[in-house]
Amino acid sequence: MSTSKNNLNQMALANMAFSHSPYSNKKIGASVLLSNGKSYSGCNIENASYGGTVCAERVAIWKAYSENLSEVKIQEVVVASNEASPWPPCGFCRQVMAEFCTPETTVRLINPAGLEIVFIFKNLFPEAFKPEHLNK
Ligand code: ZN
C-alpha cells in the first residue's frame, strides 16, 4: 500500500518536469491509480490561446481513459505543485474527475517538500453533476 502510494506520488512529482507552462510558469504534475491497478501521469500543457490549456489532472485522466474502459474507476488522484499550500484541482478538473472517480476516491495534494493534504472526492466536490443526473 505504501509502496503504491509512494510510487503514485513520485509519478506526479516527476511529471512536473514535463510541464509546458511558459505563460504561468507553474509546473504541475498529476497521477491517477485505476481500480485495475494501472496508473497514469500527466502535466499541465498550456497554450498561447490560453483556452487551449489543459491541467495536469485532466491530461492524466484522458491518458488513462484513452486506454481503459469507463467501468474502471479512479481509486487515487495525486496533484503535485511547487506551492507551500499544494494546489487543488480546478472546477473543470473536478467535473472531469466526477465522471470517473467514486465518492471515496482519495485525492492527495502534494509538493516536493513532502507536504501532503488528503481529501476524499465527495468532500472535495460534494454536489458534483454526475452521469446519474442524465440517467446514465
Ligand atoms: Zn484543472
Image (tube, rainbow, N blue to C red):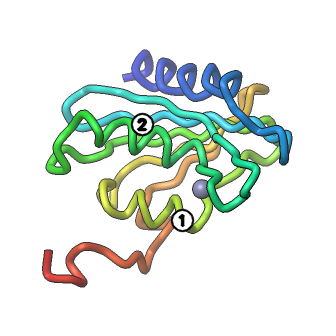
* Residue 32 image label: 2
Q: Nearer the viewer, residue 115 or 63?
A: 63
In this view, the residue in front, 109 or 55, is 55
Label 2 beta carbon less than 8 Å to ligand 1: no
User: With respect to residue 46, does 128 lie above or below?
Assistant: below
Q: Nearer the viewer, residue 112 or 59?
A: 59
Left or right position of 105 against 15: left
Q: Secondary structure at mark 1?
A: helix
Question: For the residue labelled by badge 2, is the local secondary structure a helix, a strand or a loop?
Answer: strand
| The disc label shown at residue 92, or none | 1
Q: Position of residue 28 (x, y in %)?
A: 68, 38
Q: Is mark 1 within 8 Å of ligand 1?
A: yes
Instruction: Classify residue 103 as left or right of residue 85.
Output: left
Task: Describe residue 24's horizontal placement relative to residue 36 as left or right.
Answer: right
For the N terminus, which image quadrant?
top left
Q: Residues within 10 Å of mark 1 (few under 14, many from 20)?
A: few
Residue at the spot 75% in from the left edge and 35% down from the top edge: 27
Q: Which x, y percent locates residue 29? A: 62, 34
Residue 111 vs residue 65, the one in the foreground: 65
Indicate the quadrant where residue 130 lies: bottom left
Name the residue at 60% across, 35% down: 43
Q: Amino acid at mark 2?
A: Val
Above or below 77: residue 13: above
Sequence-wise, which precedes: disc 1 or disc 2? 2
